[in-house]
Amino acid sequence: MNTDQSNLTLMQLSDSFFPSGLYTMSNGLETLFDEKRVLSEGDVYDFLAVILEQQLGPADSVALSNAFDFAKDGNISGILQCDDILHSMKLVEESRNATCRAGSQMLKCILQICSNDLLESFSEKISNNESPGTHAVVAGVCSFVMGLKKEQAIQMMLYGFCVSVTGAALRLGMIDHIQSQKILHQIKPKIQTILEKHEDKKIQNCWQFSPNYDLTQMTHEKKFSKMFIT
């Protein structure tokens, strides 16, 4: 009997049922919708493509990739370095806090279903405020511990972000269910291209440049009334 459960694990961790809290984030889309700057199916796709190319690809996926490799080597100091670097690149407080909450929730859940010394050490560092616990880095470490391949882990994070945004677009009334699935299908080649472009980069070479997106997040941060955390 085939005992490889990685595909089942991938489905579990990437499912919206998994309690990471990603469904509570619009990642700035709510503000753009309120300002009537993103209104259609095509607009949502373009929004996703820009963030994948300018932020999640060169920054979050690189941090995840390196954290995965450091976890494979049992190198906790390398994992902490990835966490600090990515956290320092999250310029907007609301977004920075949200990614740490999602990371902490993911780590807490995985620790309950998979006992592992490395995970416990990382969790202790986060609890002692010695590491922020960003979602991408936590996902990299947890993915290794749970037996996923690095490529699967990066796909999971990038696709999960797209689901979070399209889910927000759906709840805001911008698109319907069929349109949301069309967007997720059309974005797959973009995800794969970004994965292949950044998978082997070292953590020192990660970057992100999305000033207009950062301003949008800052605007959302100051909104009096909002549906989503980001």
Image (cartoon, rainbow, N blue to C red):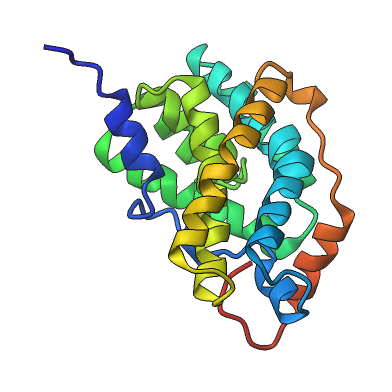
Give residue 203's position: percent from left, percent from top. 73, 24
- Relative to the observer, which residue lies in front, 56 or 88? 56
Location of residue 85 by image quarter: top right
Which sits in the foreground, 77 or 193?
193
Residue at horizontal 84%, vertical 50%?
Answer: 210
User: Against 17, is 26 above or below?
Assistant: below
Quadrant position of the N terminus in the picture: top left
Above or below for 28 versus 79: below
Q: Could you tell whether 16 is left or right of 25 in the image?
A: left
Residue 24 in view in this figure: yes
Most distant residue in the left direction: 1
Residue found 27% across the figure and 32% down from its top: 8
Q: In the rendering, at what x and y percent does residue 192 appear?
A: 60, 28
Using residue 90 as the reference point, say whether residue 117 is left or right of it.
Answer: left
Q: Where does residue 194 sit, x and y in percent of width and height?
A: 68, 30
Q: Write the residue at 33% across / 55% down.
A: 17
Towards the viewer: 116 or 162 = 162
* Quarter of the picture holding the C terminus: bottom right
| Residue 115 in view in this figure | no
Left or right of residue 229, residue 176 in this image:
left
Where is 175 relative to 96, above or below?
A: below
- Say how many tags the image has: 0
Counting from the top left corner in percent of width and height, residue 30 is at 66, 73
Q: Quadrant of residue 219?
A: bottom right
